[in-house]
């Protein structure tokens, strides 16, 4: 089986995949250690990418907020 390239750019997809991995662990009566390790590695990559994406999103929101505040200040000064 070919290894899939994770799409870590879409936050919603990453969160859904993390939920699937969590569910996989929850539903195992006896965990296959090798498969569990693969899933933990995938989850770690998704978490790292999600944190980076959230930081980017937060920065975008801050830029928008800053722009609105500057426009409002300019309107008040005029």
Image (spheres, rainbow, N blue to C red):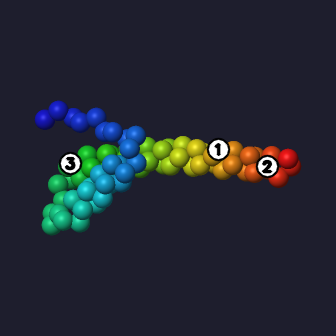
Picture quadrant where residue 5 is located: top left
Instruction: Give percent across and percent down for residue 62.
Output: 64, 48
Residue drawn at x 65%, y 44% as measured from the top left? 63
The mark found on residue 47 in the picture is none
Q: Are marks 1 and 2 in contact (CB under 8 Å)?
A: no
Picture quadrant where residue 8 is located: top left
Q: Nearer the observer, disc 3 or disc 1?
A: 1
Decide which of tag 1 and tag 2 comes sooner along the chain: 1
Residue nearest the observer in this picture, 42 or 17: 17
In the rendered image, the quadrant that contains the N terminus is top left
Q: Is residue 2 left or right of residue 44?
A: left
Give how far apart the Cα atoms at labels 2 and 3 are: 62 Å
Residue drawn at x 33%, y 48% as measured from the top left? 13
Q: Is residue 7 above or below residue 23?
A: above
- Assess disc 1: are there few (<14), some (14-19) or many (≥20) residues with their C-alpha within 10 Å of its C-alpha: few
The mark found on residue 34 in the picture is 3
Q: Is residue 10 left or right of residue 22?
A: right
Disc 2 secondary structure class? helix
Q: Are marks 2 and 3 in contact (CB under 8 Å)?
A: no
Decide which of tag 2 and tag 3 comes sooner along the chain: 3
Q: Is residue 29 above or below residue 60?
A: below
Residue drawn at x 85%, y 47% as measured from the top left? 78
Which residue matches tag 2? 75
Q: As drawn, which residue projects farthest toward the top?
A: 2
Which residue matches tag 1? 63
Give how far apart the Cα atoms at labels 3 and 1 are: 44 Å
Residue drawn at x 79%, y 49% as measured from the top left? 75
Give how far apart the Cα atoms at labels 1 and 2 are: 18 Å
Residue nearest the observer in this picture, 31 or 60: 60
Decide which of tag 3 and tag 1 comes sooner along the chain: 3
Instruction: Give percent across and percent down for residue 41.
Output: 32, 46
């Amino acid at each position: 089986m070919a290894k899939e390239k994770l799409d870590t750019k879409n936050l919603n997809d990453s969160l859904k995949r993390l939920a699937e991995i969590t569910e996989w662990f929850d539903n195992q009566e006896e965990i296959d250690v090798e498969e569990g390790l693969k899933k933990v590695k995938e989850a770690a990559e998704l978490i790292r990418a999600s944190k980076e994406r959230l930081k980017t999103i937060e920065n975008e929101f801050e830029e928008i907020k800053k722009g609105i505040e500057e426009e409002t200040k300019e309107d008040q000064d005029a």
